[in-house]
Image: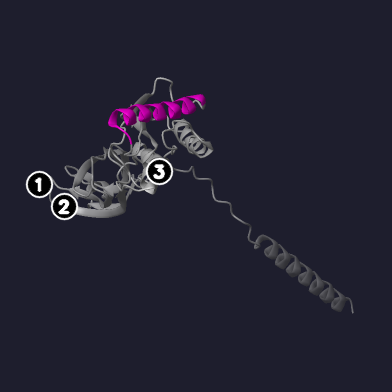
Amino acid sequence: MTRNRRTSVRGWEGICIMGAILFMLSCTGRSRPVTAPAVPSQPQPAAPPALTIDLAAKLPKKPMISAVRHDAMGPQAAGNTVRFSSEANVPEGHRLVARVGSIEVGLAPSQAGQFTGAIVLPDLAEGSYPVHAVILAADNTELASADGVPIQVAKPRDACAELQTELSPLRPLFAVNDDKLDARAQGILSIIAQRLKGAGFVSAVTIEGYCDEQGSPEYNMALGKRRAQSAKTYLAALDSVKRDADVVSYGKEKPVDSRSTPEAWEQNRRVEVKVTCSPR
């Protein structure tokens, strides 16, 4: 009985010892994280500089004109200045010109790819003149060209001639052997006065008196002068002519109607106003 207890106790002790050993083994066998020692960082070598090549700068420019413009708006006349501008690639040793018909003007670079120039138009015939921009080589070979808007050329307006054309049909008429202005003659002279007041380019006014073919030459010369003087006095009162304006009598010379009829004589008893203009 006592022997069996001892055996039983020893058995339990063995089990306890074995359990303790297994527990210790399980604790010591657990893995722990291992931290690697810090390694000082080494500086990285700098990357070599990138090799860049400006191919546009190395390759020769191809002659090219993208546009040509000018400021000639509306009809132009001799003496007018026309300004040109152009966008182009002009290789070294070449030049860019603008042409108006057969007239040529060089265009100079103003900034990258921009060219400008100007020309004073000579006395050209009326018409439309083509505009071109051309790149020329050293031997004047045309390498590239572009068209612009044609320039219209017109003869300058002759204001003096236009005024005289307006005044020519304005002829005050007179009664037979009379130098007095009737209401109709005064109305015509008032219209003439308005035309003259707006014509600053007129430098002198001449008033011419005429008669019909009746009467002697001497009588008609004197009567024609009195008629011209009457018209001058009326125009001077309207501040349209100077009081020292010229008066001329042609008597019965220079008739507007050479027939020997009352209707013709009526038209020939007249006054005409002529203008002289200052040179421009």
| Label 2 element class | strand
| Label 3 element class | helix
Label 2, residues with CA under 10 Å away: few <14, some 14-19, many ≥20? some
Mark pair 3, 2: CA separation: 71 Å
Q: Position of residue 151 (x, y in %)?
A: 30, 49
Which residue is label 1 attached to? 139
Image-quadrant location for residue 104: top left
Q: Position of residue 39 (x, y in %)?
A: 50, 45
Which residue is label 2 attached to? 142
Label 1, residues with CA under 10 Å away: few <14, some 14-19, many ≥20? few
Q: Position of residue 36 (x, y in %)?
A: 54, 51
> Which-is-in-front pick, marks 3 and 1?
3
| Label 1 element class | loop
The colouring scheme, among rainbow, by chain, secondary structure or one colour, is one colour
**Type of the residue with mark 3:** Glu
Q: Which residues are magenta?
A: 215-237
Q: Is residue 123 left or right of residue 199?
A: left
At a point 14% along the width and 47% down the height, the residue shown is: 137
Q: Position of residue 154 (x, y in %)?
A: 31, 47
Furthest residue toward top: 244
In magenta stretch: residue 218: yes
Image-quadrant location for residue 9: bottom right
Numbered label attached to residue 266:
3
